[in-house]
Image (spheres, rainbow, N blue to C red):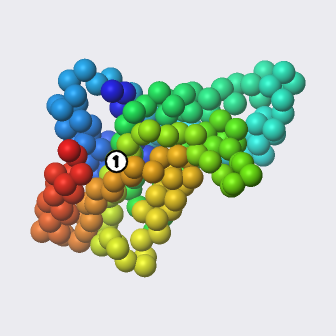
Amino acid sequence: MNILQVNASARREDAHSTRIAQVIVARLQSANPAARLTVRDLASHPHPVLDEAALGALFTPAEQRTPAQAARVALDDTLIAEVQAADVLVLGAPMYNFGVSVQLKTWIDAIARAGVTFRYTGNGPEGLLTDKKVYVALARGGRYRDAATDTQAPYLKMVLGFLGMTEVQFIYAEGLNMGPEAVQQGFAEAEADMTAVLV
């Protein structure tokens, strides 16, 4: 088993989402001692955003790219290769301003490439990143689970499914900015979620 852990907090240390992701990975490794782990920390190693230069590089045929364009595309290729090689993805996803972090959005923009990780067919789009399990560690300061204000989980379920990753489980740690008792409850709920989905 190949596990890919993606830490998508803006914080390099003490991120709640990373903490939960690490627990998930530890449990997966305990159940699968031979599992290989790759960690992609987007705070320690920020990925460049999808801008005009990146789009120009992606839409230029490979043989016509400048060295700078080739280098830019290669950065995305590395992230795509990590996902393609993974059997299990563990995403640490904090909520920032009711959505995903810019770090996670940049990672998604990098791995979503037509003809590589999805394709358009006569029957509509087809995701090419199939046969993978995804565990998403959601860390929130307030409580949003199953509420209209939770745009994060529906978005991630949709975009990951679009890419072919339809086995997505969410682990929620909520209320983490609502005082010590709420923090304790939030991590207890995350523990319950892990017990339910990590089989």
| Badge 1 density bin: few <14, some 14–19, many ≥20, Cα 10 Å | many
Identity of the amino acid at label 1? Tyr
Check the image and report above or below for 109 versus 46. Answer: below
Q: Secondary structure at mark 1?
A: strand
For residue 30, side relative to residue 93 (left or right): left
Query: Is the C terminus in the top left, top right, bottom left or bottom right quadrant?
Result: top left
Check the image and report above or below for 2 versus 146. Answer: above
| Residue 68 seen in render | no
Residue at the extreme right of the image, as rendered: 64
Residue 3 in picture, x, y percent from top left:
36, 31
| Residue 58 seen in render | yes
Residue located at (23% from left, 71% from top): 178
For residue 151, side relative to residue 63 (left or right): left
Q: Please give the count of numbered marks on the rendered protein.
A: 1
Residue located at (22% from left, 28% from top): 32
158 and 106: which is toward the camera: 158
Q: Quadrant of residue 115?
A: top right
For residue 152, side relative to residue 119 (left or right): left
Residue wearing tag 1:
135
Residue 19 in picture, x, y percent from top left:
26, 45
Residue located at (43% from left, 79% from top): 148
Residue located at (47% from left, 27% from top): 85
Residue at the extreme bottom of the image, as rendered: 148
Check the image and report above or below for 185 versus 169. Answer: below
Residue 116 in picture, x, y percent from top left:
65, 35
174 and 196: which is toward the camera: 196
Check the image and report above or below for 155 versus 80. Answer: below
Query: Is the N terminus in the top left, top right, bottom left or bottom right quadrant?
Result: top left
Residue 196 in picture, x, y percent from top left:
19, 54
